[in-house]
């Protein structure tokens, strides 16, 4: 079962055909010009969300065009605006573009996306996509992959329910990770593996993921986490 988390409207082209590659580039340029025009026509009074969305779309297009520097620039601008306006789901999407741009601080961007995507109850599909990035970036035998997949299943169970398709996908993710990690291939072995790694204890695997995120970001965060936590505590949401 496959899920396409972001860029749901993105067309897929056959990169092996020269004519298709050319057509794709022409289409990307057309899309780029459209969103750049939309962005240029915004006034100072335009909703921040609209500006952020245009910047993210431009960033995604530039990622597809292998224009990583411009993609990063647009996405970071979008991130700053999203942070100022507390539009945290858009902030995560902006971080995703920065990660995909493969810039020098791509992993730092992923760390921010993970922290925000787990801290705030945004679209679970986006949070799972960020966790999937972490799974794909980590060595197959590493515990980080197991932790990320466990968090994905935990998030989908809470935000979507146990019978949701996304929760089913998360179950498949953790089963695949278990096989790669310890050659787990049946339910009893899976249960033992899960218990051994304490993947049945949210208080444990969430703390371990927090440690992994800190390693990705280092000591220079782009957000004030203490301020965010304090506000969530005051609102009774943390």
Image (spheres, rainbow, N blue to C red):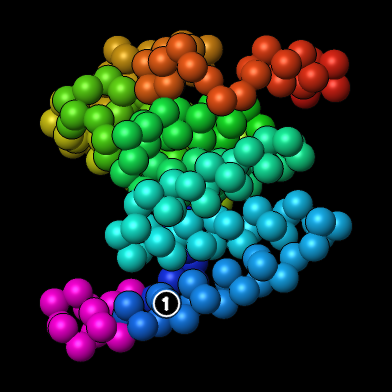
Residue 201, image x, y percentages: 47, 15
* Left/right of residue 77 with respect to residue 45 in the rendered view: left
Residue at 25% of width from left, 30% of height from top? 138
* Left/right of residue 118 with respect to residue 211 in the rendered view: right
Q: Is residue 167 visible?
A: no
Residue at 49% of width from left, 72% of height from top? 32
Q: Nearer the viewer, residue 219 or 111?
A: 219
Looking at the rendering, which quadrant does residue 161 occupy?
top right
Residue at 40% of width from left, 82% of height from top? 27
The mark total stands at 1
Residue 170, image x, y percentages: 42, 43
Looking at the rendering, which quadrant does residue 212 occupy?
top left
Residue 117, image x, y percentages: 57, 35
Secondary structure category for the residue under label 1: helix
Q: Crowdedness of circle 1 by 10 Å Cα count: few (<14), some, many (20+)? A: some
* Left/right of residue 59 with respect to residue 13 in the rendered view: right
Let me know if residue 188 is in the magenta part.
no
Query: What's drawn in magenta, residue-wise?
Result: 12-23
The correct choice, above or below, for 36 with respect to 167 in the image is: below
Residue at 63% of width from left, 38% of height from top? 80
The correct choice, above or below, for 214 with respect to 74 in the image is: above
Residue 59, image x, y percentages: 48, 57
Q: Nearer the viewer, residue 8 or 35?
A: 35
Q: Nearer the viewer, residue 25 or 206?
A: 25
Residue that carries the numbered disc 1 in the rendered image: 29
| Quadrant in which the C terminus appears | top right
Q: Is residue 65 visible?
A: yes
| Quadrant in which the N terminus appears | bottom left
Q: Nearer the viewer, residue 218 or 136?
A: 218
């Amino acid at each position: 079962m496959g899920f396409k988390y972001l860029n749901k409207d993105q067309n897929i082209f056959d990169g092996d055909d020269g004519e298709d590659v050319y057509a794709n580039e022409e289409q990307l340029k057309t899309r780029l010009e459209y969103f750049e025009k939309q962005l240029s026509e915004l006034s100072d009074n335009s909703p921040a969300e609209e500006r952020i969305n245009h910047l993210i779309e431009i960033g995604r297009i530039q990622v597809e065009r292998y224009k990583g520097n411009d993609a990063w620039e647009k996405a970071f601008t979008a991130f700053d605006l999203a942070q100022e306006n507390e539009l945290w789901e858009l902030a995560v999407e902006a971080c995703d573009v920065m990660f995909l741009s493969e810039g020098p601080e791509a992993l730092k961007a992923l760390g921010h996306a993970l922290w925000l995507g787990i801290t705030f109850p945004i679209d679970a599909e986006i949070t799972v996509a960020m966790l999937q990035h972490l799974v794909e970036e980590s060595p197959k035998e590493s515990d980080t992959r197991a932790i990320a997949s466990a968090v994905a299943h935990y998030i989908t169970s809470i935000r979507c329910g146990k019978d949701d398709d996304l929760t089913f996908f998360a179950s498949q993710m953790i089963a695949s990770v278990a096989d790669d990690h310890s050659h787990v291939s049946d339910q009893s072995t899976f249960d033992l593996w899960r218990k051994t790694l304490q993947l049945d204890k949210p208080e444990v695997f969430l703390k371990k993921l927090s440690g992994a995120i800190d390693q990705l970001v280092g000591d220079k965060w782009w957000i004030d986490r203490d301020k965010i936590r304090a506000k969530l505590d005051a609102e009774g949401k943390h």
